[in-house]
Image (cartoon, helix red, strand yellow):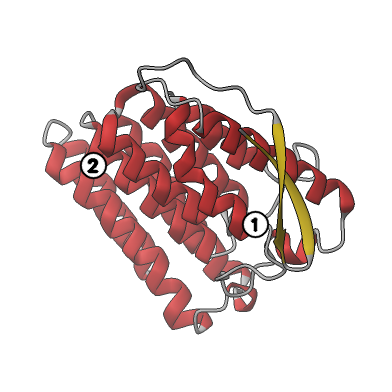
Amino acid sequence: GSHEQLLGFLSTCRRSFHKLAQVQELCVHLACQAAAKILARSCGGDPQRHTAATLDAARACVAFCHVTLPSLQQAQPKLNLMLQAASVALMNGLVSQSESLVRGAVALAREEAEGAERDGFLRQCASLCLLLPGHPQRGPLYVAKDLEEACAQESDKISLLPMVCAFAQESLPYHCRGLDSNDVLYAGDEDYHRELQETGGRVIAGAVQVRSLPFPAVTPTKQKKHKFAGRTYIFLSC
């Protein structure tokens, strides 16, 4: 099909211009664009309408991104393209591929990004994490926990608080068409809400340990109750 011809052409470009970063980045972007077009034109934007052929085509585009991304040297373009590929994979219902790209991007940001650049990128990852369904063995929030660990400074964790609050809502503020997120998969699951409460408590407790202040870090000693979607969540406070 046309996508096979395109991927063949992009593979040739990748091989012929392997020393030109801009060509490598463009190849990844065009592969993402191709996967998005397959979904829009062949499935009307609904991944549940994929046929075996169209799903294989989308999967091939995402696989091309997986293979090409490690060759990129500059961190920021690489991070942005990893997140773009993860978004396109999720739109096409390729959850495991999307999870792999997000976790890889979070690990890379933890090692190479700094300051506001890292904080802004992790916020983007948090927005995508809302859509990722939980893993049956690793738990409903295992990707979100990667994000939490990537916050090198305790005070950075405050940027994850909107994600935790959004997870606690009865219905998430946005959804990916044709994909059930945690608000559907874990509706009424007490273990999920308990884990969410613990995660929120850690995020808030970490956020108040502001190391830049001249006085010693405070220790959370009290509890405050917050209600989201009819449920009461107890978070530690000072």
Q: Choose mark 2 or mark 1, whichever is in front.
A: 1
Name the foreground residue: 168 vs 44. 168
Give residue 15's quadrant in the image: top left
Asked if 216 appears above or below 168 in the picture, the reply is above
Q: Amino acid at mark 1?
A: Phe
Q: In terms of secondary structure, where does tag 1 sit? A: helix
Where is 51 relative to 24, above or below? below
User: Which residue is under mark 2?
Assistant: 77
Q: Residue at x 56, y 45 (%)?
A: 99
Q: Nearer the viewer, residue 232 or 168?
A: 232
- How far apart are the two marked residues, 2 and 1, measured between alpha carbons? 29 Å
Mark 1 or mark 2, which is nearer the start of the sequence?
2
The numbered dot on residue 167 is 1
Residue 203 x, y percent position in the rendering = 58, 36
- Relative placement, left or right, of 125 versus 26 is right
**198 to the left or right of 2:** right
For the point 13% across and 43% down, the residue is 22
Observer-nearest of 49 and 74: 74
For residue 142, above or below residue 178 = above
The amino acid type, in three-letter code, at marker 2 is Pro
Q: Could you say where residue 218 lies in the image, as x and y percent from the top left?
A: 55, 22
- In the drawing, does residue 138 fall left or right of residue 112? right
Q: Which mark is residue 135?
A: none
Q: Is residue 92 above or below residue 7?
A: below
Quarter occupied by residue 38 = bottom left
Mark 2 neighbour class, 10 Å CA radius: few under 14, some 14 to 19, many 20 or more: some
Q: Could you say where residue 171 lies in the image, as x and y percent from the top left?
A: 68, 71
Q: Which quadrant of the rendered structure holds the C terminus?
A: top right
Q: Residue 60: in sight, yes or no?
A: no
At 33% from the left and 57% from the top, the residue drawn is 31
SS at badge 2: helix
